[in-house]
Image: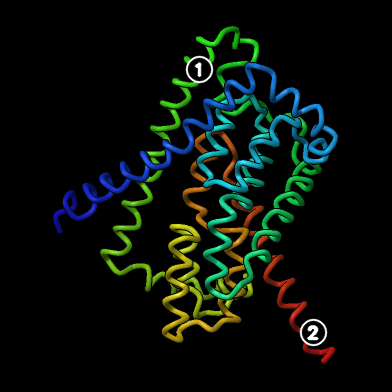
């Protein structure tokens, strides 16, 4: 196999296209947030949201991050985070909330195509993300330091020129980060696909699936969801349901699991690169996914007993 022609160059080409597409979305948003912060709009919003977000351990100004996350891919709220000064504790809480509830209109619509209602997925992810934020606020250490990217303080923003320079610097860092992570993911996926390892891996993870309360026949889809996310995973699920390989009840269980825990490689790398502990973000999402599926199964059994 010509490694460069088969794996590297296709991955780089695809990563460049994806990065450009993402930057067209996130760079204008991040610049807007810079100016909102500079002109005091975020501080104005914060005074109304502080009483609510205090229960999440977050300043009210970070509400724009969570709201953006709900409606756009994860790179958009990440760009806003890099435009603000937050502590590592706040970043950890935001990371979990945004990982659980991001790009909901698109991802919930995809999951609805596999038989799980749109609003079930949408509301589940919003509610769970808020509950996780409240829980983390209770258990995280009070002092965790600053994230590794935080180099410009709010006091340094003394003119429009300084704001633009700070935005250009963070945009360059963001662009490099996005391109690097997407390229690594594409290379990994192309290697797995070339050597037919995804099917073999799905057999090896059956004990993991049992632990999470998932049927063995969802192993391949579980891997896809964890490697490349809900969009591609949803398309594959539709195909497997059409072929009779996965039933609607099995697909629904997997949908609830993946709703709160998916694309763990890419999602986690994004925030680990900023200084967040992998154990917090990965461990919490896996624990929440376990709770959601087993709670759903218990509710289903109780309903059968009441009939």
Looking at the rendered structure, the secondary structure element under dot 1 is helix
**Which x, y percent locates residue 229?**
48, 58
Furthest residue to the top? 158
Which color scheme is applied?
A: rainbow
Counting the numbered discs, the total is 2
Q: Quadrant of the N terminus?
A: bottom left
Q: Which residue is mark 1?
A: 166
Q: Nearer the viewer, residue 126 or 269?
A: 126
**Residue 50 left/right relative to 37:** right
Q: Quadrant of the C terminus?
A: bottom right
* Vertical side of 117 occupied by 46: above or below: above
Which residue lies at the image location 47% right of the left edge and 80% below the top edge? 241
Which residue lies at the image location 62% right of the left edge and 65% below the top edge? 118
Q: Nearer the viewer, residue 78 or 151?
A: 78
Which residue lies at the image location 55% right of the left edge and 46% below the top edge? 72
Furthest residue to the left? 2
Furthest residue to the bottom? 307
Q: Contact, CB < 8 Å: mark 1 with mark 2?
A: no
* Residue 254 numbered mark, or none: none
Q: CA distance from mark 1 to mark 2?
A: 56 Å
**Which x, y percent locates residue 255?**
58, 69
**Disc on the earlier residue, 1 or 2:** 1
Tag 1: Cα neighbours inside 10 Å, few (<14), some, or many (≥20)? some
């Amino acid at each position: 196999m010509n490694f460069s022609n088969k794996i590297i160059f296709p991955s780089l080409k695809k990563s460049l296209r994806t990065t450009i597409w993402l930057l067209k979305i996130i760079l204008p948003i991040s610049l807007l947030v810079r100016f909102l912060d500079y002109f005091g709009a975020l501080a104005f919003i914060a005074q109304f949201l502080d009483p609510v977000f205090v229960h999440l351990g977050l300043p009210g100004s970070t509400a724009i991050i969570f709201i953006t996350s709900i409606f756009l891919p994860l790179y958009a709220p990440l760009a806003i985070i890099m435009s603000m000064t937050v502590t590592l504790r706040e970043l950890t809480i935001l990371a979990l909330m945004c990982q659980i509830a991001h790009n909901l209109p698109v991802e919930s619509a995809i999951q609805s195509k596999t038989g799980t209602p749109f609003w079930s997925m949408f509301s589940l992810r919003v509610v769970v993300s808020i509950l996780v934020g409240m829980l983390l606020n209770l258990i995280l250490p009070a002092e965790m330091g600053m994230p590794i990217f935080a180099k410009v303080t709010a006091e340094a923003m003394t003119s429009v020129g300084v704001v633009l320079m700070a935005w250009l610097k963070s945009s360059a860092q963001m662009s490099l980060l996005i391109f690097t992570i997407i390229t690594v993911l594409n290379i990994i996926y192309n290697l797995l696909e070339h050597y037919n390892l995804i099917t073999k891996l799905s057999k090896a993870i059956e004990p993991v699936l049992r632990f999470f309360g998932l049927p063995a026949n969802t192993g391949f889809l579980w891997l896809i969801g964890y490697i490349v996310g809900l969009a591609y995973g949803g398309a594959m699920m539709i195909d497997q349901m059409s072929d009779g390989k996965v039933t609607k009840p099995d697909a629904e269980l997997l949908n609830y699991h993946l709703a709160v825990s998916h694309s763990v490689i890419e999602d986690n790398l994004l925030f680990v690169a900023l200084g967040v502990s992998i154990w917090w973000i990965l461990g919490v999402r896996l624990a929440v996914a376990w709770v959601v599926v087993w709670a759903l199964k218990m509710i289903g059994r109780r309903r059968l007993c009441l009939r």
